[in-house]
Amino acid sequence: MNAVTEPETLSELIADCALIPATLQAENLPLPRSAAKPWEVDEVCHAQVAELDAYV
């Protein structure tokens, strides 16, 4: 790893990343998932595209 310059190739970048100590690496934990509310088209959304044919 050359700390003075940025890696110039993908292989140099991979080699640099391989040298990151495990204590500094992010934990490999699953991200919490939350259920999103169903998406619905309301009047405001519909109004944004109501005149779209006039612009196309």
Image: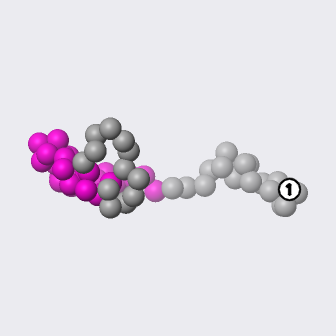
Q: Residue furthest left?
A: 23
Position of the C terminus by quadrant: bottom right
Q: Residue at x 82, y 54 (%)?
A: 51
Task: Locate residue 21, reporting x and y percent.
Answer: 14, 45
The rendered magenta stretch, by its main secondary structure, is classed as: loop
Q: Is residue 11 placed above or below 16 in the rendered structure?
A: below
Inspect the image, locate mark 1, and give the three-letter code of the amino acid beneath it.
Tyr
Write down the quadrant of residue 11 in the picture: bottom left
Residue 48 belongs to the span the image colors magenta: no
44 sits left or right of 31 in the view: right
Which residue shows up at 25% across the image and 56% down it?
Answer: 15
Classed neighbour count for the residue bearing mark 1: other residues with Cα under 10 Å, few (<14), some (14–19), many (≥20): few
- The type of colouring in the image is one colour
Which x, y percent locates residue 40?
A: 55, 55
Lateral position of residue 36 relative to residue 46, left or right:
left
Which of these two is toward me, 30 or 45?
A: 30
**Residue pushed farthest top?**
4
Left or right for 14, reference 44: left
In the displayed structure, would residue 6 be above or below residue 33?
A: above
Viewer-nearest residue: 19 or 55? 19
**Residue at left offset 17%, top offset 41%:** 24
SS of the residue under disc 1? helix
The span shown in magenta is 13-38
